[in-house]
Image (cartoon, rainbow, N blue to C red):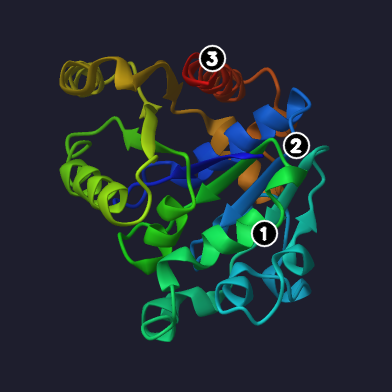
Amino acid sequence: MAIVISFANQKGGVGKTTTAINIAASLAAINKRVLLIDMDSQGNAGTGLGFVRAAHKQNVYDVLMENSKIEENILTTAVKNMHILPASAKLAGAELDMLDLENREYRLNNALETISNNYDFILIDCPPALGILTINALTASDYVIIPLQCEFFALEGVQQLLSTIQAIKQKWNPDLDILGMVLTMYDKKLGLTKAVEEDVRNTFGDKVFKTIIPRNVRVSEAPSHGKPALFYDFKSTGAQAYLRVATEVVNALEKRI
């Protein structure tokens, strides 16, 4: 069965979607079968892979509402071995739409059970909020990866996320665990960046991946071309960093299995 990993941080603009896309592409590049699920109503994971929302009807909202089966909503990407379950603007109203649904926290988990054997990894890009969509993602996940931007407020809100993860372990998913934290948007020219890194590593120790994702113009440009950084500019420092993080992910999983 697939290993399910959510990328979560309720703070926006930390590189969460970019990290999910590029780790997914890196895993696909080493011949792992990967499904990326976009749970954010903005749909940036789909856009970053070249999909125009209006051009397809497939979306995760209809899966959560049980309007259609999950296998009917999965699209093939231009990256070999990589599929996507795209978002929908209707996800913005999911909190209200799912309020009275039976087993609403398990909707995504139940859907994934039917296709789990088709993939090695299922990666979930969570919205920047700790609502029902993130709860669905974490309830369906084996692990969480937390992207943290190298800025003054990097740790702001992380404790709330950790409390949410603990609550989900107690109520819905006792096997959920944090796989690691990824430091993103690292600018070595800024003294503050190094201080933030030291603060995060002192706080979370070996939970923080060794590889740091630098600020890199090629990584920023790649989504506008509908490509992961790995396939936009393989030699760029950003693409190479994400490859190393993907290696750390695989190694961390091997130690736990």
Q: Position of residue 124 (x, y in %)?
A: 53, 49
Q: Is residue 229 above or below residue 58?
A: above
* Crowd rating for badge 2 (residues with CA inside 10 Å; few <14, some 14–19, many 20+): many
Helix, strand, or loop for circle 2?
Answer: loop
Name the residue beneath numbered marker 1.
85
Left or right side of 173 for 254:
right
Q: From where the camera sits, is residue 210 visible?
A: yes
Q: Are marks 3 and 2 in contact (CB under 8 Å)?
A: no
Looking at the picture, which amino acid does disc 3 mark?
A: Asn
Choose between 50 and 10: the one closer to the eye: 10
Label 3 sits on a secondary structure element that is: helix
Q: Earlier in the sequence, mark 3 or mark 2?
A: 2
- Residues packed near mark 3 inside 10 Å, few (<14), some (14 to 19) or many (20 plus): few
Residues under labels 2 and 1: Cα distance? Answer: 14 Å
> Whole-percent x and y of residue 186?
36, 24
Residue drawn 37% across the image and 77% down it: 95
Side of 151 where 188 appears, left or right: right
- Please state if 147 lies on the left or on the right of 70 as rendered: left
Q: Nearer the viewer, residue 121 or 36?
A: 121
Which residue was labeled with disc 2?
Answer: 33
First in residue order: circle 2 vs circle 1: 2
Mark 1 → mark 3, Cα distance in angstroms: 26 Å
State which quadrant residue 191 falls in: top left
Query: Which amino acid is tagged 2?
Result: Arg
Q: At label 1, which amino acid type do we have? A: Leu
Q: Which mark is residue 251?
A: 3
